[in-house]
Amino acid sequence: MERVGRGDDAKAWEKLGYRLVLEYRLVFPASFAALPHLVHLASRSAQARGLAGTILRCAAGHHGCDDLLAACADAIAEFSELLDRHLQTRPPDYLETFLDLLAAKEQYHWSAALGDFTDDFYHLACPHCAVEVTIAIGDHGRYSAIRDWHLGDVDRLGLRPAAHEELSGIGRWMHETAVRDAHEPLADGIAHLFGKAECPRCASVFTIADEYTSANSPILQ
Ligand SMILES: [Zn+2]
């Protein structure tokens, strides 16, 4: 830790990252013990920022992390503010930072599930007829469909994005943040993800994010 504190020695950072989260992305009490120091370094070190973010993302679904997270509450609050300031500079690692901030807010589900909306698919069950519905939100289209092994996505129906005032909770925060930072692809993708889809089979209309969350929670990594 002393060594990495002096500069951005890539090898030292790699070693430290390996010790704190291992290659299996597991976290230990030592990972949380290192958090306050990493957060302290994070304002001037991209490596420290990245490693602190990785530790928080890895906290999802691990038993015994709650007490360790609670003990780091001050460092996590400081880290959240730092990430939020970093987002406002519209950095090249915007999405990574956004996902780290979601993890810092203990929104592990979206931190793990959210993509960049260039080619994203979400699979869920229709809440009414239980047929598996494929949701596409990407450059190639924004639709609900039935995935056919031979024919691809058939019976496509356009999604109905949510207007900002219809959003609440974490969806509203995500949309607000992406709009604030003029990150249009992300804001638009989130509006679709937290918007509505129609089931191609039974025509019932549901909120994508709600059904996807209930199909994929809790996330165990
Ligand atoms: Zn249905």
Image: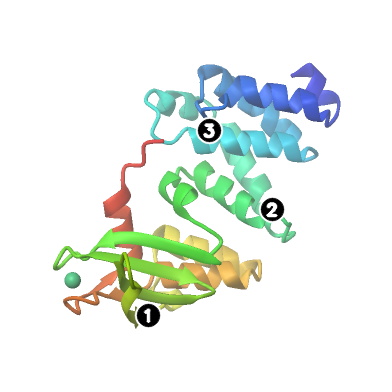
Q: Is residue 196 visible?
A: no
Location of the C terminus (image quadrant): top left
Of mark 1 and mark 2, the one earlier in the sequence is 2
Query: Is the N terminus in the top left, top right, bottom left or bottom right quadrant?
Result: top right
**Residue kind at label 3, given as amino acid type:** Ala
Crowd band around label 3 with a 10 angstrom C-alpha radius: few (<14), some (14–19), many (20+): some
Would you name the residue on which mark 1 appears?
160
- The tag earlier along the polypeptide, 3 or 1, is 3
216 horizontally vs 42: left or right: left
Instruction: Determine the residue positioned at 69% across, 53% down.
Output: 93
Estimate the spatial distance between the alpha carbons at disc 3 and disc 2, rounded to whole Å.
25 Å
Q: Given contact means CB atoms under 8 Å apart, are the residues at marks 1 and 2 in contact?
A: no
Question: Which is in the foreground here, disc 3 or disc 2?
Answer: 2
| For residue 108, side relative to residue 76 (left or right) | left
Q: Which mark is residue 93?
A: 2
Label 3: element kind: helix
* 202 vs 112: above or below: below
Q: Could you say whether the residue bearing mark 1 is in a helix, strand or loop? A: loop
Q: Quadrant of ligand 1?
A: bottom left
Label annotation for residue 73: 3
Question: Residue 198's x, y, as percent?
Answer: 27, 77
Residue type (three-letter) at the residue carrying disc 1: Arg
The front one of 143 and 214 is: 143
| Residue 119, position as x, y percentages in the image | 51, 65
On the image, the x and y values in percent for residue 17 come to: 65, 26
Marks 3 and 1 in Cβ contact (< 8 Å): no
Pointer 2: residues within 10 angstroms few (<14), some, or many (20+)?
A: few
Question: Does 151 appear above or below 39?
Answer: below
Residue 19 in the image: above or below residue 132: above
